[in-house]
Image (cartoon, rainbow, N blue to C red):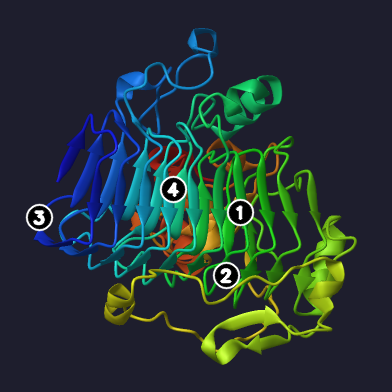
Amino acid sequence: MLYNGAVNCSLKNCTLTNLGGNAVFFNNYNRNCEVSGCLISEIGASALCFVGDPNAVRSPSFEYWQFVPLDKIDRTPGPKTNNYPAECKVYDNLMFNLGLVEKQSAGVELSMCQSITVSHNTIYDVPRAGINVSEGTWGGHVIEYNDVFNTVKESGDHGSFNSWGRDRFWHPDKKILDSIVETNFDLTMLDVVKPIIIRNNRMRCDHGWDIDLDDGSSNYIISNNLCLNGGIKLREGVNRVVENNIMINNTFHPHVWFKNSNDVFCRNIVSTGYMPVQINVWGKETDYNIFADSVSLKAAWERGTDKHSVCGKQDFENPEVGDFRLKEGSTGLSVGFKNFAMDSFGVVSPRLKTLSKKVLIADFVAISKADTDVIIGFMGAKVKNLTTLGERSATGMDATRGVLVVEVPVGSVASKFLLVNDVILSFNNKAINHLHDLLEAKKSAIEDKTEVVIFRNQKEEKKWVELEN
């Protein structure tokens, strides 16, 4: 079903099933439209899409490797035209078994649109994200009271909620991007001109993050969300406030932040210590959080964060049935955490409630992170097995494989061809999946030069390396 130029139109209490492409598509100009009370299943692509006109975007860079030079960027905030969906509502819909043909799909896809409310929907059994925001253009969305689970079943490096920014300030080279944000901070807010609000949702991702903000996602307010398995990740971006969320059996994943990100992470419950990747600065404020164990809290103190945070038994009301409100007198309440309702997620229609699958509530386990990764020397650099989901995300790898470069001293042999955060995939024509593969490949090289394949900035690169005598 296609909406193009629709105003004050609605689709209510319908069943859409066995469709080969997208079920409902709001294309270009649409205003004050609503989809509610619908059952959408067995869909070839996405259930609901809101996609504006690319010509409404100022200085667009639609592909990862595109970038408009600074002196040519249009610095006018917001859209160029009004040819995009806005002020629409997605309410009380049951969506499942989506993406049967197109895997880069979602339950609700928001792209080049503004102020879309996505509320009280239940979304599950999808190959990728349940709710996806691609590009920050132009913000203002309210994503609330949704129940999203069984996501990222046929892909990786994604989340139940996923976003990427790649707005006008975006550059694929992190060093250049750092410089742009430091010297042209105004560019970061030109596209996402209104904050995107994610609140009061329940999300569970078993193959990624529950909430995953990637590639420059900026201007978000994330609060009162129950994250059942994958935690919350923030990659390059600015002006994100993450407050009063619960992360069961997981934690906070900050990845490659800017010095002046202005990010806030406060009054959240985490089940284990943070898992940072390439983080030297911790935003505007990271404090008043609740840890399950003293080891994790002390690790935060050593990094200079969480001066007022606390640790202790996370005494929930009834975790077996998904009630993760803190009991009266719990340590977490002492730093300002506020309980929120645990019975308001997902669809509200009795018919859809009856039809809906229920989210799995796993046993709550407070985990202490133990760093057992082995780091070895290699041609002057320090390398380790790529093992974690966080390392995969930070490098952009498609799978947990290869050897990750963690340190490259200036002047070393490795500095001629390696950078920190490279992943070595092949050496001397031998595939590298583990450290022992790399050592065996190096040992078997008999020529003065050999080929190495590395993964850098989202693509493979081949380099010739002169070997040490």
Residue 113 lies left or right of residue 96; in this view the side is right
Q: Which residue is mark 3?
A: 20
Q: Nearer the viewer, residue 416 or 444?
A: 416
Q: Which residue is mark 4?
A: 117
Residue 113: x and y in percent read: 39, 34
For this orientation, the residue located farthest to the top is 71
* Mark 1 element type: strand
Residue 311 lies left or right of residue 225; in this view the side is right
Labels 3 and 2: the sequence-earlier one: 3
* Mark 4 element type: strand
**Mark 4 or 2: the one toward you:** 4
Q: CA–CA distance between discs 4 and 3?
A: 26 Å
User: What amino acid type should be assigned to the residue bearing mark 2?
Assistant: Leu
Please report contact status of discs 4 and 2: CB closer than 8 Å, yes or no: no
Please report contact status of discs 3 and 2: CB closer than 8 Å, yes or no: no
Q: Which residue is mark 1?
A: 222
Please report contact status of discs 1 and 2: CB closer than 8 Å, yes or no: no
